[in-house]
Amino acid sequence: MTTYLFPPPPVAAVPVRGHPELFPVNRLFFVGRNYHAHAVEMGKPVDKSVERPFYFTKAPQTLALSGSTTPYPSETANYHFEMELVLAIGKPGFRVKAEDAHDIIYGYAAGLDMTRRDLQLVARDKGRPWDLGKDVEHSSVCSEIVPMPGVVIERAAIELSVNGAVKQKSDVDKLIWNIREIIADLSLFYHLQAGDLIYTGTPEGVGAVLPGDRITGSVQGVGEVALTVGPKA
Ligand code: MN
């Protein structure tokens, strides 16, 4: 029997609607700049005819369940919300064709890609990795996963409010690279596995929160996500 010098960290996991079992999280992938209006607000418009999607990852240890209160992170003065549709992978897939992408979909969730925007932009503009801006403790907020095996979401209202005021309002039909295209492209680089979560990108309207703020978001037909920003770490 394998033994360890100290207890290994617990498996990151998310509740599943209608099931007693948790969804064990393997990897967290994030699509960058996947709504035109958000790409424009970041000063980096996307021309799909000549560009491919890009990704960053966060450690599974950054997962925070919807409804949590998480600390305002250290070393930032510009902590941003990004509302996203989260795709949950349920089967292995490598070099998956777009027309077969539905085969490996387990379901969906509503998520937040919380970001130290000040540090992300410094990294971006200096050509450095994004980790300090993106791989932030407690920054990968996820609702319960809704089992929708084989379903490809093509349109759904996506919305986020802070303290009840709407900040982001769009539709998943505005994704630059859609669900099938994301799976096809990402699986060229990674052997996707059951337990992988793919945050599909945020629409326009991103902005900063402060300690005490309450974020609520929704994806039509999927669910809701909530986060309370706690005191500074
Ligand atoms: Mn994002």
Image (cartoon, helix red, strand yellow):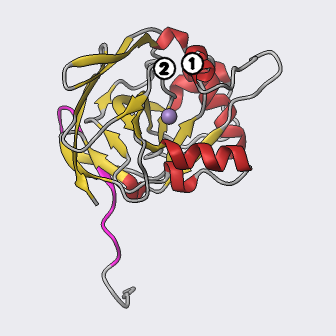
Residue on which the image places disc 2: 203
The three-letter code of the residue at mark 1 reads Tyr
**Dot 1: few (<14), some (14–19), or many (≥20) neighbours within 10 Å?**
many
Query: Is ligand 1 less than 8 Å from the beta carbon at label 2?
Result: no
**Magenta-colored stretch includes residue 15:** yes
Q: Measured along the vertical axis of the image, is residue 137 above or below residue 113?
A: below
Pick the quarter of the image with the N terminus.
bottom left
Q: Can you give x and y, in whole percent of width and height, for residue 174 in the image?
A: 54, 10
Magenta part of the chain: 8-19
**Cβ atoms under marks 1 and 2 closer than 8 Å:** yes
Pick the quarter of the image with the C terminus.
bottom left
What residue is at 51 percent from the left and 9 percent from the top? 173
Q: Can you give x and y, in whole percent of width and height, for residue 213 in the image?
A: 22, 36
The three-letter code of the residue at mark 2 reads Pro
Displayed quadrant of residue 45:
top right
What residue is at 30 percent from the left and 34 percent from the top? 145
Residue on which the image places disc 1: 35
Which one is earlier in the sequence, the residue at label 1 or at label 2? 1
Does 229 sit left or right of 177 as displayed? left
Query: Is ligand 1 less than 8 Å from the beta carbon at label 1?
Result: no
* Residue 23 visible in the picture: no
In the rendering, which numbered label is found on residue 2?
none
Q: How far apart, in angstroms, are the residues tagged by discs 1 and 2?
A: 5 Å
Q: Measured along the vertical axis of the image, is residue 176 above or below residue 216?
A: above
Residue lying at the far bottom of the rendered structure: 5
Between 196 and 38, the one lying in front of the other is 38
Disc 1, SS: loop
Q: Measured along the vertical axis of the image, is residue 84 above or below residue 55?
A: above
Does 89 sit left or right of 68 as displayed? right
